[in-house]
Each structure stands twice: as structure tokens, then as C-alpha cells.
């Protein structure tokens, strides 16, 4: 379990939920079903936190539904309810198991064996792999064999927000659908419409990224507080008023990934202000610190000395002098 996932609880939104940025993909997938162009493998290039896993579930329900409309699953029949509750015997899901950070070869082999069996209902069997970039090398190679020799009417749905981390051989054997990340304001509006105005959704997504599905499941108020506290501290670090060693020691004990996300967003904002003339800054130092933050993000799930990594980054920030340009 990642540090961000510790702050969340699992839950699937209803199949009839309106997701503006996914509407076009839903239409495209429905058209592919109607014209028999869906194929046997689809690479959904949408981060699970942006709705990729929900879209895969919607598509599975669309295919299993016993009473579909022209464009969507009914959401109420037994088959739809089984899909949403993970009780559909012909639907499998592959994700990292428990504390594992990878999807392993034995999981893929078990999936392939299950896909080769006769379906319980309409004959179709579906497997959802998410996040697909977590397939380790051996698992990806095993999956390639299944992609090259699909079993019957089976369908593989690979969900990922980082398709570049998948082997090119796997990508080339899948039909692709994807979206660009919507403007943050659109995501904030959607979150407010679903969960109200009582939470600073901008602060939440500054900490976890533009992942509104994850934001809905998160301890939103606690994460927003953490983001604001981090931003206040960074303002002090940049002015030389905060001790990098003490701060790094406190931040490195837990929530390292969230802190790094907050630091990265803080830096991106200042770089944008510098680029638009709103702020004078040592641009070279800002970009160097941003590189450090992005490198540190890759260490979130490793046993590296996190306080030391944060200390290095905070000392870099401590050396950055920023000031407002005169009006």
C-alpha cells in the first residue's frame, strides 16, 4: 500500500455517474461494441484516480448487462450489480496484492488459465489489469503470450496513467483509448458538485495530483490541511526562516509522497509566476529543485532514507531567493 493509498478507502461510483471528461471515451467504446471493432484487448490510457478503473468497470458492465440501453449498461440488473460488487464470475481483476508493489507472473498465469475456461454466462470473459504499469517484466512477458493468442471471446482491459512504462510489444497489441488531463478547474467543479463546497479541493489535488476519484475516497480535510501546512513551511524555507534539517526529519517520518507532491506543485506555481512576469526568481535554481523533487517522487516506495532526501531538497529551496516585481 502506498502512502497516498493509506489516506483512502475503496469504493466504486455508480455506473450512471456523469464524468464529463470520460463521456467521449464512453461513446467511442460503445460505437466499437456496436460495430464489432472492440477487439480482444483495450489499453485505457486514463489514470485510475482520474476514472480509468471506473471506465473499465463501466465497459465490463456494458458487455455483461442483460438489459443494456443503446449506449450504456442499465446499472440495475443482476449482471450489472455483480460487476460493481466484484461478484461477476466471468470478470477478473489484477492489481498488486497486499503489500506488493508489482503485478506478478503467477497472477497473469492464473488469469490466462481462467480466461481459457468456458464462461458461466454469455460466454464472454473479461480481465481488468490496473494499474497496468505495475506489471513486472516477467508478468508483462506472460501477458504478451495471452495477447498474441487470445482465448475465445475473452477481453483484456489494461488501465494505466503511465502507458510509457508498459513494454512497446504489449502496447502494440492493444486498441488504445485515452484522454488528456482536464483543466484543474473542471475537476474542482465536479468534486464540488458531488461532495459540496466544504473542502478545499484545490489543496487536496495539489497533494495527490489531478485525481478526483482518489480525492473522493481520501481523507480530504486531513490532506488539505497537510498541503496548506507544507506550503506555509515552503514559503518560510525559501526565505531562509525554516530549518531544513528539522523540517526534513519531521516530514520524512510519514506522508513522504504527499509532501513531495506538494513541493512539486509549489515549485511549478513559482516557475509559472516567473515565466508570466508575476515574480522575480532564480529560474535556474527553481528548475534544479523541480528536478530534485521529481527524482525524489520515484523514491516514495523504496527504503531510501527519506529525511535525508527531503533535507537535500529543502537545502536547495533554502538557497532560492524570490521577490515580487514592482508594479
Image: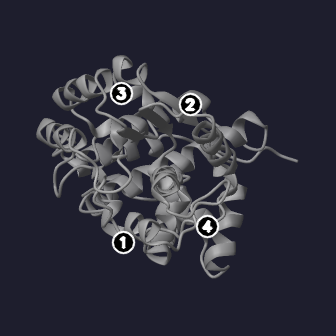
Q: State left or right for residue 214 relative to residue 323.
A: left
Residue identifier under label 1: 9
The disc, 4 or 1, on the residue closer to the chain's N-terminal end is 1
* Disc 4 packing (10 Å; few <14; some 14–19; many ≥20): few
> Is 277 in front, or is 52?
52
Identify the mark nearer the N-term, 2 or 1. Answer: 1
Closer to the camera: disc 2 or disc 4?
Answer: 2
Q: CA distance from mark 2 to mark 3?
A: 23 Å
Q: In the displayed structure, would residue 18 be above or below residue 128?
A: below
Say what secondary structure mark 4 lies in. loop
Image spot of residue 84 (x, y percent):
42, 67
Secondary structure beneath disc 1?
loop
Q: Which residue is the site of mark 2? A: 37
Give the mark, 2 or 4, whose residue is nearer the N terminus: 4
Q: Is residue 175 above or below residue 308?
A: above
Disc 2 and disc 1: Cα gap in Å? 36 Å
Q: What is the CA distance from the residue labelled 1 to the residue labelled 3? A: 27 Å
The answer to whether marks 2 and 4 mark residues whose Cβ atoms lie closer than 8 Å is no
> Looking at the picture, how far across and down is residue 90, in whole percent?
30, 54
Q: Is residue 277 visible to the viewer in this orientation of the structure?
A: yes
Name the residue rendered at 28%, 63% in the picture.
250
* Residue closest to the eye, 281 or 310: 310
Q: Position of residue 288 (x, y in %)?
A: 48, 30
Q: Which mark is residue 17?
A: 4
Amino acid at each position: 500500500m502506498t502512502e497516498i493509498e493509506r489516506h483512502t478507502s475503496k469504493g466504486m461510483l455508480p455506473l450512471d455517474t456523469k464524468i464529463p471528461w470520460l463521456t467521449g471515451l464512453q461513446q467511442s467504446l460503445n460505437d466499437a461494441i456496436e460495430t464489432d471493432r472492440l477487439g480482444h484487448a483495450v489499453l485505457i490510457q486514463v489514470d485510475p484516480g482520474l476514472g480509468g478503473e471506473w471506465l473499465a468497470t463501466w465497459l465490463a458492465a456494458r458487455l455483461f448487462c442483460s438489459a443494456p440501453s443503446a449506449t450504456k449498461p442499465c446499472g440495475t440488473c443482476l449482471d450489472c450489480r455483480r460487476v460493481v460488487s466484484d461478484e461477476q464470475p466471468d470478470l477478473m481483476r489484477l492489481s498488486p496484492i497486499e503489500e506488493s508493489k508489482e503485478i506478478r507472473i503467477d497472477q497473469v498465469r492464473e488469469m490466462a488459465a481462467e480466461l481459457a475456461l468456458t464462461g458461466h454466462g454469455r460466454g464472454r470473459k473479461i480481465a481488468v489489469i490496473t494499474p497496468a504499469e505495475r506489471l513486472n517484466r516477467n508478468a508483462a512477458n506472460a501477458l504478451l503470450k495471452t495477447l498474441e493468442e487470445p482465448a475465445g471471446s475473452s477481453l483484456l482491459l489494461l488501465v494505466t496513467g503511465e502507458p510509457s512504462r508498459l513494454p512497446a510489444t504489449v502496447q502494440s497489441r492493444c486498441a488504445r483509448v485515452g484522454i488528456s488531463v482536464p483543466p484543474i478547474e473542471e475537476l474542482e467543479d465536479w468534486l464540488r458538485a458531488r461532495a459540496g463546497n466544504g473542502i478545499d479541493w484545490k489543496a487536496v489535488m495539489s497533494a495527490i495530483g489531478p485525481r478526483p476519484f482518489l480525492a473522493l475516497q481520501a481523507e480530504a480535510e486531513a490532506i488539505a490541511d497537510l498541503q496548506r501546512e507544507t506550503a506555509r513551511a515552503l514559503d518560510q524555507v525559501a526565505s531562509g526562516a525554516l530549518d531544513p534539517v528539522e523540517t526534513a526529519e519531521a516530514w520524512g517520518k510519514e506522508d513522504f509522497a504527499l509532501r513531495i507532491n506538494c513541493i512539486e506543485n509549489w515549485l511549478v506555481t513559482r516557475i509559472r509566476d516567473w515565466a508570466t512576469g508575476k515574480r522575480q526568481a532564480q529560474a535556474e535554481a527553481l528548475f534544479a529543485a523541480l528536478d530534485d523533487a521529481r527524482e525524489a517522487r520515484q523514491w516514495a516506495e523504496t527504503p531510501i532514507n527519506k529525511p535525508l532526501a527531503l533535507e537535500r531538497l529543502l537545502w536547495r529551496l533554502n538557497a532560492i531567493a524570490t521577490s515580487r516585481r514592482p508594479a
